[in-house]
Amino acid sequence: FARTQMALADEGHSALAATLGASTRLLADLRTAARRVAPLCPPGWSVVRVYRSAIEGHLRSQLAPLWSGPRGDELEVEELTRAYEWLQAYNGLVARLDPEVDQTEDDSEDLGVALAPRGPCRAFADGSRFLMAAYLERVARQVEGWFASIRARKAEPRADASGRL
């Protein structure tokens, strides 16, 4: 993760673009684990859930500052939408690869480790809601500013070439 993130930053990408790029690399690895590794292992090994739990813990630590700290206030409107879209894409992918199932017990107990709950990541869903709310608030402020600027202008009648107003 860190190598990819630093390589992207060295190429001139913004901090957010570098973080999301490195995060996307982990998503590609998760897809590969689901397609190529999981079929080779016994179903009880829950390869996708184990891998997902490992990367999701790291991704939460990297991405949570976007919606739970001062860094979120520094994001531009375009960056808010990029982060929102990434979180939505992540949750869409894990919902397909590790869907929620109706069961009363946590099957991760069989493995002896705590795994991420099945289905979309709740922290990322909460982060998505926060980022969308921040986006809508900023856009509303921009639009209000535009209208205030329009109202503040003195409208002067202008005559056309024939002298009509």
Image (spheres, helix red, strand yellow):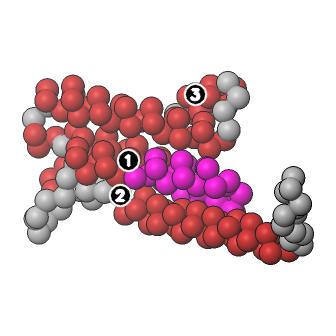
Which residue occupies 18% across, 32% down? Answer: 38
Q: Name the residue under label 1.
A: 90
Q: Which of marks 1 and 3 is nearer the N terminus?
A: 3
Q: How crowded is mark 3: few (under 14 residues within 10 Å), some or many (20 or more)?
A: few
Which residue occupies 87% across, 52% down? Answer: 161
- Does 5 sit left or right of 112 as displayed? right
Q: Give the range drawn in magenta.
A: 61-88
- The answer to whether residue 48 of the structure is visible from this angle is yes
Which residue occupies 46% across, 47% down? Answer: 86
- Does 64 sit left or right of 155 as displayed? left
Which residue occupies 27% across, 31% down? Answer: 33
Q: Which element carries disc 1, helix, strand or loop?
A: helix
Q: Position of residue 97 (x, y in %)?
A: 23, 44
Residue type (three-letter) at the residue carrying disc 3 = Arg
Point out the image quarter for the C terminus: bottom right
CB under 8 Å between discs 2 and 1: yes
Report the mark closest to the observer, 2 or 1. Answer: 1
| 151 over 14 or under it: above or below | below
Residue type (three-letter) at the residue carrying disc 1 = Tyr
The disc placed on residue 3 is 3
Q: For marks 1 and 3, give the CA distance.
A: 21 Å
Q: Where is residue 117 in the image (x, y as percent from the top left)?
A: 27, 59
Q: Which element carries disc 3, helix, strand or loop?
A: helix
The disc placed on residue 121 is 2
| 54 over 130 or under it: above or below | above
Q: For marks 3 and 2, give the CA distance.
A: 25 Å
